[in-house]
Amino acid sequence: MATRVCTKCKENQPLNDSHFPNASRKGKPHRFGTQCRKCQRERSNKHYRDNKQVYKERAKEWDRNNPERVRSNRIKWEKENENSIREAKKSYHSRPEVKEARNEQSRKYRMSEEGRFKESVRAKVNGALKTGNLAKPDECEYCGKSGYVEGHHEDYDKPLKVNWLCKKCHWIKHRLNDGRVS
């Protein structure tokens, strides 16, 4: 097998694509590069570190010019990495300082006028469920998935008008609420 010496590290390596990547441009004949893959990677990383701000600005500009692509790429990435995202969130929320901050935030919200009002509406729903005036189905109204469902109020002024959603659909409903939290 033919070998080649890298011009940077001076190591003798086999002459194939795994060691010397194709350095040709479109329209030019195929030829192997003069540096091995490891040295070429180091060179590229150094160039990126030296010009990091330029690359970041270029990426931000592309994001501003392509909002639909950015949104669809984010949704696609979230679907592909659903399990790792869940594990990262679980790990983050199990930290003591995060638990304490969330508890404090929750206490403040429950003491606010809006929080007390929503708690009273939820209490009415729970009371209606106990007395049998309101029935809780065993499947999600949106996706039809059987199992655990949560109550969602579109309008808290109508306390017994409740949509029953699975946890995922409930999360999506709040997330796609145009920035408003309900």
Image: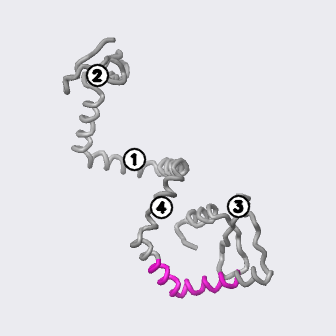
Q: Identify the image quadrant of residue 161.
A: bottom right
**Magenta segment boundaries in residue numbering:** 103-125
Question: According to the image, label 4 marks what residue?
Answer: 89
Total residue callouts: 4
Residue 17 image point, x, y percent: 36, 22
Picture quarter containing residue 177? bottom right
Look at mark 1 in the image and give the residue it sits on.
Answer: 62
Give the amino acid type for the residue marked by disc 4 in the picture. Lys
**Tag 3: residue type?**
Tyr
Quadrant into which the C terminus falls: bottom right
Judge by depth and name the residue closer to the eye, 35 or 55: 35
Q: Position of residue 124 (x, y in %)?
A: 69, 84
Q: Which of marks 3 and 4 is nearer the N terminus?
A: 4
Q: Secondary structure of the magenta portion, mostly?
A: helix
Residue 152: image location, x then y, percent:
66, 72
- Image quarter hosting the N terminus: top left
Residue 142 disc label: 3
Residue type at mark 1 is Trp
Q: Nearer the viewer, mark 4 or mark 1?
A: 4
Vertical order, 77 against 120 (above or below) = above
What is the secondary structure assignment of the residue under circle 3? loop
Q: Is residue 74 magenta?
A: no
- The residue under the point 49% across, 57% down is 87
Lower sequence index among marks 2 and 4:
2
In primary-sequence order, the first of circles 2 and 1 is 2
- The local crowd at label 1, few if under 14, some if 14 to 19, many if 20 or more residues have their Cα within 10 Å, is few
Tell me the residue that label 2 is attached to.
33
Q: In the rendered structure, find residue 28 and report the number of the disc placed on it.
A: none
Residue 91: x and y, percent? 45, 62
